[in-house]
Every structure is written in structure tokens, then in C-alpha cells.
């Protein structure tokens, strides 16, 4: 029977594990020195080698002839554990065995010495799925384990584990594997499988795998089913990816506000069975590329998996769109992707998303309003709008009203560039700013205090101490889809505006605590509300003085 590549090429020693040298080197040294812990916690995203390292560790601690911390793979214990004939190594899936009774069955066996191996090893995968009662049952054994027991816990969501469990385990964090490391491994495996793969195709597979080696091998399996000579086009067809040309076309449509071409391109991709959600992710990644090129310029090349020609094309696009507009595009795409995951017609959702990107005036989101104001300001700075001098305007009016204007003067005037009276443009910017302020005031009028704000601040402290100290002392209100933050001065807002990623972090923390996505903005009290607050404070001060024993005297 055919064995899929990710099973066939699963590492059997620590040296075969790629991209996790900080984990494997530590484990090898511990085994070589005999410093074996009673409980290990492996955490990281899917496909990064957690379960694989757990199995290698189970063989290594029981190996009769370890080679520099590695299992020999030849002794009775290594062969028995690999074949499953030795029952002292138990693998348990906590996703389907998460009750107290399941854990108690395991703990009833813990007191017995191993039958054939040196240690009884329990590998509990997806350990975050255990119930509270199951964690409590496991806790006592983790605190005072028998000498012949080793627990290896693996999870993708370490934040769901109780602190009491975390403190009793030796923790190892598995990193996402970089695309170039995945590509190198894929080229080796393809060579051993008598299949040719180009370097660009291997890099594309690595990028699509999102740091998971298992996903990369699964995609390589699909590619081999399509062709023996794997190119970037084969990978895109197997993975359902849109080509870079389509992404540049869609980005040009956004920059040029070309709705017909954008909708036509989306329809072409949908007819070719391209996934709309995947296309949304790719376009988000493309605008991230533009964002990095605008902020980091040439330093961003090390973070991008693009050819030289693609980098040049992306640079050209980055020159034609501001950073504020780019971040707004990413926000709109991210919101549309969330809606796709909640259900509905993905094609219609993505078409609506493209219309919003090409026509920001269709969106009343605060970030879209700010992007439109920024665009007007950029137009004024670039000279698209030019202030007409009063004398210039008078001479134009005189020339137009004069009946004796010669043909030469008319032609000369026609050859001059059209003068747009900039006061109109300035007024437009001012009107947009006023509209944004009015929108904030309207939201503030309907706002209600957010009782969970202290919990959100505590979560900020765990995520970023700097962010927490900047936001400490603020209050928050909820109004519709917005969380409005109230501060004594503009310092917290200047801190958030200086780095778009900080806005994203705050939104993620709010979603984590409140369970839904909110836009964020400043809480602007209306003049009437501010006056009432000032009056209330004055009345309170007078009342406190009246109720006190202090006597006020007036000397003549």
C-alpha cells in the first residue's frame, strides 16, 4: 500500500528534524547527560514536528545504546517502540479522550513499573482539549510522579492550559519553519522520489504551507500526482493559488479605482475554480508586501518571497499608494475574510470587498474615512490641486469677459494647465475632517461604558508591557461596532498611530475578551457633555465644602 510522503519521510532521529534545532539540541544534551525530566510540553503551530519529536524522545529515553543523545534505531526497545509491540509507550489523543475517566485510566497504570522498557512514556496530543476535571486529576501525578514515568504533552493552543500544568512541565516552543528551509528539504525528498522540482516551485510550496512541513509534504504529494516535473504553475494548480500576475492586476485596480476590471478579474479566477478565501488571503499578503516596501524599502527584501522582477513591480505599486491607504486595504480584506469563514457566498463577498477597495466612499468605517482624508491631503501636497492667485483669477475673468480678446490670447490661455481653485480642495479636507469628528461625536452620544476594559488592559499587559503602560489610565465605551477609548491627552492615540500593528494587537485582544471584532477610535465628548461634566465637578466641590467643618471668613 502506498504511504503518503509525510508518513514515509517522518524523521526518526533528532538530526532529521528541520527548523527546530533549538529544541532538538537541548533534548539530545539532556538524554546524553541523563537529565531526563518527568514532564515535557511541546507547543507550536500544526505540522512543525511536535508529535514527531515526542516519538523520537520516547525511543531515545528507552534506547539501550543511545548515540550522542539519539536513539540507535537498532536495539530491541527502539524496534519494539517503532513497531508498537512494546506497550510501555502510550499515545493518547486528548481531543477524543478528554474526560476525567480517561485520565484516571491512565493514572491507574502509572503506579506499575514498565514491562520491557526503562520508562513508561505517555504522549498526550492536543492536551488543551482536556476538561477542567481531567486537568485537576492529572495535576497531582505531574507534581509528584513516579521515577519511571515520563509525560510528553503536545498542544497547538498553549494559552488554554492551566498555569498549574504549565509550571510543572519543561516547555519547548516549536517555531514555524521558514519557506527556504522547507524548500531545501522538499528538493531533497523530490530527488529521492525521482521527481524534479524547480527552486521557485519549492519556495512556493514552502510559502503556501505557512510554516508546516507536514502541509508542505501533502502539497508535494498532490503536485507529484499532476506531473513529474514540478514547476510553479503545477504548484499553483495543485494548491488552487492565483498567480502573481492576477494579484498585481487586482492591486492596480484598487490603486486606479477600476471597478469593472476588478470584477472581471475576480470572475475569471472564480471560473478557473480559484478559492475566493485563498485569493483574499493572497491579496492581503500582497498589500502586506507593499506596506513593507513603503516602510522598510530595500530592507524588506529579506522578508519577501518574490523574484527580482516581482519586487520591482511591487515597488512601482508602492509608490502610487500611501501607507494609510495600504493599511486600510489590509483591514477591509481581513474583515471580508472573517465574513467568508462565517458562511455565505464567498464570491459575492469578495466582489463586494473589491468594490469597497476601489471605492472607499462606499464604506463608512473610520479607517476608510481616514484613508480618504489622507488621499486628499496627499493630492494637495503633490500639487494636483493648486491655489489660484487672486490677481490670476481676476485676469482670467477679465480675459473671459473682454470682447476684444485676440485668437492668439485664447490659444495661449488654452495651452496653460487648468487651475483648480484649491480653497475648494482645502474645504473638502476640512469637511471630511468635520464629518469624521461628527461621526465620533455621534458614536460618543450613543456610547455605553465598557465594563470589561480592565480585563482587556490585563490582557494587554501579558501581550505587550509597553502597550499596557501607554494605555493605562484610559477608559472605554461601546457604541455599535466601535470601542471608543477615552484618555486624558493624545499620548495613547499618537502611540497607536505610530505603528499600525499596535491597532491590530488592540483589536485582537478586544476580540479575545469580548468574543467579537470591534473597530476602535477615540472617545470625543460633545461640548455640551464636557460642560455638564465640568459643572457636575464644580457642584460636587461646593457640596463637599458645604458639608465640611471648614469656616470661610472674608476680611475687609
Image: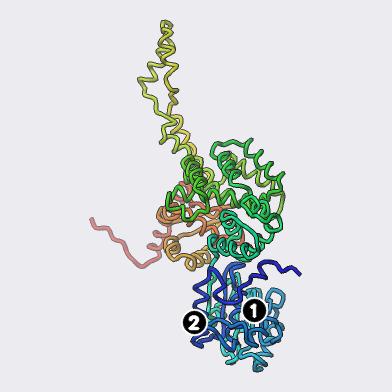
Quarter of the view holding residue 253: top right
Q: Residue at x 57, y 88 (%)?
A: 65
* Residue 509 point in image, percent of width and height: 54, 62
Q: CA distance from mark 2 to mark 1?
A: 23 Å
Q: Which mark is residue 544?
A: none
Which residue is labeled 2 in the image? 29
**Is 120 above or below relative to 515?**
below
Location of residue 220 in the rendering, given as x and y in whole percent from the top left corner = 65, 60
- In the picture, measured across the screen, residue 107 lies left or right of residue 534, that is right
For residue 124, the mark is: 1
In the current view of this chain or complex, which residue is farthest to the left?
556
Task: Tell which of 128 and 25 is nearer to you.
Answer: 25
Q: Are marks 2 and 1 in contact (CB under 8 Å)?
A: no
Q: Position of residue 123 (x, y in %)?
A: 64, 80
- Residue 125 lies, in percent from the top left, at 65, 76
Q: Nearer the viewer, residue 287 or 216?
A: 216
Image: 168 above or below 198:
below
Camera-side residue of 407 and 266: 266
* Quadrant of residue 468 within the rendered picture: bottom left
Residue farthest to the right? 1
State the SS at label 1: strand
Amino acid at each position: 500500500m502506498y504511504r503518503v510522503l509525510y508518513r514515509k519521510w517522518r524523521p526518526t532521529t533528532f538530526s532529521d528534524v528541520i527548523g527546530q534545532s533549538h529544541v532538538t539540541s537541548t533534548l539530545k544534551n539532556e538524554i546524553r547527560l541523563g537529565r531526563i525530566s518527568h514532564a515535557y510540553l511541546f507547543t507550536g503551530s500544526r505540522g512543525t514536528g511536535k508529535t514527531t519529536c515526542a516519538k523520537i524522545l520516547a525511543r531515545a529515553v528507552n534506547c539501550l545504546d543511545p548515540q550522542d543523545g539519539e536513539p540507535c534505531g537498532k536495539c530491541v526497545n527502539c524496534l519494539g517502540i517503532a513497531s508498537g509491540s512494546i506497550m510501555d509507550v502510550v499515545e493518547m489523543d486528548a481531543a477524543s479522550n478528554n474526560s476525567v475517566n480517561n485520565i484516571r485510566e491512565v493514572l491507574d497504570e502509572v503506579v506499575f513499573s514498565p514491562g520491557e522498557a526503562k520508562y513508561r512514556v505517555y504522549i498526550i496530543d492536543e492536551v488543551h482539549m482536556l476538561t477542567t476535571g481531567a486537568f485537576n486529576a492529572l495535576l497531582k501525578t505531574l507534581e509528584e510522579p513516579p521515577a519511571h514515568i515520563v509525560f510528553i504533552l503536545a498542544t497547538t493552543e498553549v494559552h488554554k492550559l492551566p498555569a498549574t500544568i504549565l509550571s510543572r512541565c519543561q516547555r519547548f516552543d516549536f517555531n514555524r519553519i521558514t519557506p527556504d528551509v522547507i524548500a531545501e528539504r522538499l528538493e531533497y525528498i523530490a530527488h529521492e522520489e525521482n521527481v524534479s522540482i524547480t527552486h521557485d516551485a519549492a519556495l512556493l510550496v514552502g510559502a503556501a504551507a505557512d510554516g508546516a512541513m507536514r502541509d508542505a509534504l501533502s502539497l508535494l504529494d498532490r503536485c507529484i500526482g499532476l506531473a513529474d516535473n514540478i514547476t510553479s504553475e503545477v504548484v499553483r494548480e495543485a494548491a488552487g493559488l492565483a498567480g502573481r500576475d492576477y494579484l498585481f492586476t487586482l492591486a492596480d485596480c484598487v490603486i486606479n479605482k477600476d471597478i469593472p476590471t476588478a470584477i472581471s478579474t475576480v470572475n475569471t479566477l472564480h471560473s478557473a475554480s480559484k478559492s475566493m478565501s485563498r485569493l483574499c488571503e493572497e491579496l492581503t499578503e500582497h498589500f502586506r508586501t507593499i506596506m513593507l516596501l513603503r516602510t522598510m524599502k530595500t530592507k524588506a527584501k529579506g522578508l519577501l518571497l518574490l523574484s527580482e522582477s516581482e519586487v520591482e513591480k511591487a515597488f512601482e505599486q508602492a509608490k502610487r499608494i500611501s501607507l494609510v491607504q495600504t493599511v486600510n486595504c489590509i483591514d477591509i480584506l481581513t474583515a471580508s475574510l472573517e465574513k467568508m469563514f462565517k458562511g455565505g457566498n464567498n464570491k459575492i463577498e469578495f466582489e463586494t470587498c473589491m468594490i469597497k477597495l476601489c471605492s472607499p466612499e462606499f464604506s463608512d468605517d473610520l479607517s476608510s474615512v481616514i484613508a480618504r482624508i489622507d488621499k486628499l491631503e496627499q493630492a494637495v501636497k503633490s500639487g494636483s490641486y493648486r491655489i489660484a492667485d487672486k490677481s490670476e483669477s481676476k485676469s482670467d475673468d477679465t480675459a473671459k469677459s473682454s470682447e476684444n480678446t485676440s485668437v492668439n490670447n485664447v490659444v495661449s490661455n488654452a495651452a496653460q494647465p487648468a487651475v483648480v481653485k484649491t480653497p475648494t480642495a482645502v474645504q473638502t479636507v476640512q469637511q471630511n475632517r468635520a464629518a469624521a469628528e461628527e461621526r465620533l461625536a455621534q458614536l460618543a452620544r450613543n456610547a455605553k461604558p465598557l465594563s470589561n476594559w480592565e480585563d482587556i488592559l490585563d490582557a494587554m499587559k501579558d501581550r505587550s508591557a509597553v502597550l499596557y503602560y501607554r494605555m493605562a489610565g484610559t477608559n472605554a465605551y461601546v457604541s455599535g461596532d466601535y470601542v471608543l477609548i477615552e484618555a486624558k491627552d493624545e499620548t495613547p492615540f499618537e502611540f497607536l498611530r505610530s505603528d499600525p500593528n499596535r491597532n491590530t494587537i488592540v483589536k485582537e485582544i478586544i476580540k479575545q475578551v469580548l468574543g467579537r471584532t470591534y473597530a476602535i477610535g477615540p472617545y470625543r465628548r460633545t461640548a455640551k457633555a464636557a460642560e455638564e461634566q465640568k459643572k457636575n465637578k464644580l457642584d460636587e466641590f461646593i457640596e463637599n465644602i458645604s458639608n465640611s467643618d471648614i469656616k470661610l471668613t472674608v476680611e475687609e
